[in-house]
Image (cartoon, rainbow, N blue to C red):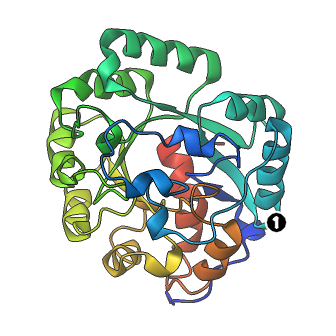
Amino acid sequence: MSIVGRMPRPNDVGTIDLMIGFPSPERRSSYKFAGLKDEGSESLEMPAGFLFSDLPGESSDDLEAIATTVAAMDEFGVEQGMFSVDDVAITAKKLHPERVHLIGAIDANGGAEEVRRLRQQHADLGLVALGVFQAGLMPLQSIADPMLYPFHALAVELGLPLVANAGVPGPRFPAEVQHVRHFDDVCYDFPELQLVMRHGAEPWQALAIKLMLKWPGLSYMTSAFAPKHYPEEIVAYANSRGADKVMYAGYYPMGLQLSRIFAELDNVPLRDEVWPKFLRTNAQRVFNLP
């Protein structure tokens, strides 16, 4: 009989973390977004710093950063991770090819040249996904903006999932471009596309669930949320019709320590049979991982 219990030991599952990174000293410069207008954001360690406390530290060089993250993965049973492409991640991919997977970031303002760049990046590095932060694009663009449609087509062509933010952004940008309703149009226009919502979908999580029930290619990952703050509706959905739709993603070192994430996961009331899907097998299927 299905029961709600404690999370299995991560080493028994081989967790896949769909949003993890390296504690580089360049973290702050990587968060310089042109569209931020308020003075307060400039003083934060990262643009959504008011939402997070006890940010993970930084490492002084690339190899130290890689070693720090791999050690943390080992400690908490994270077998594989998905990392944004940068020089550190490329080096880590060479050192740990079975554990480090790369997601390419879309700049929709690049047009055809950006399409060519991403196609070449995939050929060179073997990307497992494309990703876009809609509120971080200038001008602001929803997932259904015509400027992003060539990248949806590219993802289908390459057989890659596309990951996009859903919900009110943490940085002080307008939220409309990340409204969950925009995913509906993209799922209709690109029925072959595997489209993954990240960053919670709040306060539109109920609509996110309705759309996942509607569209076979739409799923959800838990990035940027400490487990104690996972939306209740999402946990209930994962325990029922959404067992194959909800995937674990952390936020280390961008905002959360792995120690906190895995301590709090113990108290997430997922059913026993859902845990392996949430921590591993859904990600394997959607992102075509080993």
User: Position of 96 compared to 210: left or right?
Assistant: right
- The percent position of residue 274, horizontal first and vertical second, equals 51, 73
User: Position of 155 compared to 75: left or right?
Assistant: left
Residue 164, above or below 87: below
Residue at screen point 30% across, 41% down:
134
Viewer-closest of 129 and 156? 129
Residue 147, above or below 198: above
Residue 82, above or below 266: above
Near mark 1 (Cα within 10 A), the count class, few <14, some 14-19 or many ≥20, is few
Quarter containing the C terminus: top right
Name the residue tied to disc 1. 75
Residue at screen point 74% across, 43% down:
99
- The percent position of residue 227, horizontal first and vertical second, equals 52, 76
Q: Residue 133 sits in which quadrant?
A: top left
Residue 78, above or below 195: below
Q: Residue furthest front?
A: 39
Q: Residue 34 sits in which quadrant?
A: top left
Residue at screen point 24% across, 62% down:
208
